[in-house]
Image (tube, rainbow, N blue to C red):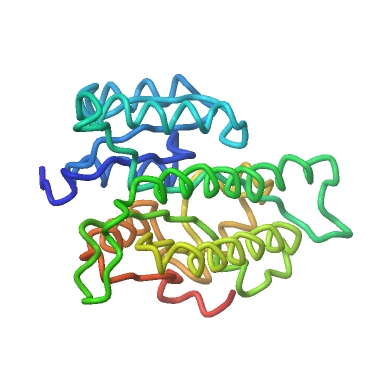
Amino acid sequence: MADFLKDRIGVVTGASSGIGEAVARALVDAGCPLVLNARRKEKLESLRKELGDEDVAIAAGDCADAEVITHMLDLAKDRFGGGKGKLSPKREADLIVINAGRGLGGTALTSDESQWDDLIRTNITAAARLIRAAGRRLLASIPENQIKHDGQWLERPRDIVILGSVVGRHVSPFSSFYSCTKAAVQTLAEGTRRELGPKGIRVTLVEPAFVTSEFQAVAGYSPEWYTQMVEKFGPMLSPADVARAIVFAVSQPAHVHLSDFLIRPTRQEYP
């Protein structure tokens, strides 16, 4: 196991499958202890057992719930933050991956309206609440004397990584209502980057295109349609492909920021 992220403390939402699970595996492999969040506690328990209790804690629940967010951030600090007493306080999580999200097929005219509220809550509200909670804690963790003007003031990296989608930038004709939620995520990420970047906190937007995972079934896309997409664009991305890119981004020196990147299968020309 590599250990180039051994001094970091991570939190990953939506970690029970797909990209979130792959990111969890990749970060632990790089030496980063993690708190994992998802609604499916049994999946998280299985992943913790596989990756090891020493490196993984779980905070199951709805990632849009303020109490769940507080619990996951407190757990990261208490389990992995080290420090004893006022002279050596516990460190906050400094590598937050906001991955939880869900899809929905259709447009404003054709999509299932009964799913709109959950889609907005999971994709936008949950992301905004964790950005706020983590951002405030990260700001409070920066020493008052850290900010200087000699180019050497960033003593260590602090990251908030937000999973968007290619369709948040290039609207999809077959899932435009979902696209609008990911366009909102893009705006949240860029606004937060401009706010926190000057203070030494990196905010990175990752926009994957087609990734083979549970996402397609949950979004209601038919297997026949997805087979056609594979034939047209394949080989598709795997969750591990996206996780590898995220680990590369957060492994950069503190003064280097990959602020946003879009990752597609090579043969996917659009969206």
Q: How many marks?
A: 0
Q: Position of residue 35 (x, y in %)?
A: 36, 32
Left or right of 107? Residue 29 is left
Q: Determine if residue 208 is in view.
A: no
68 sits to left or right of 86 = right
Residue at point 42% right, 33% down?
Answer: 73
Q: Position of residue 82 (x, y in %)?
A: 20, 29
Q: Residue furthest right?
A: 109
Q: Quadrant of the N terminus?
A: top left
Residue in the foreground of this view, choosing between 3 and 242: 3
Q: Please state if 6 lies on the left or on the right of 210 as rendered.
A: left
Question: In the rendering, at what x and y percent does residue 110 appear?
Answer: 86, 56
Residue visible at 63% across and 42% down in the picture: 218
Q: Is residue 63 above or below residue 252?
A: above
Q: Residue at x 39, y 33 (%)?
A: 36
Q: Quadrant of the C terminus?
A: bottom right
From the viewer's perspective, tell me whether residue 247 is left or right of residue 271. left
Placement of 24 over or under 173, stated as above or below: above
> Which residue reaches farthest bottom?
269
- Work out whether residue 211 can be spotted: yes
Residue 37: percent from the left, percent from the top?
A: 46, 32
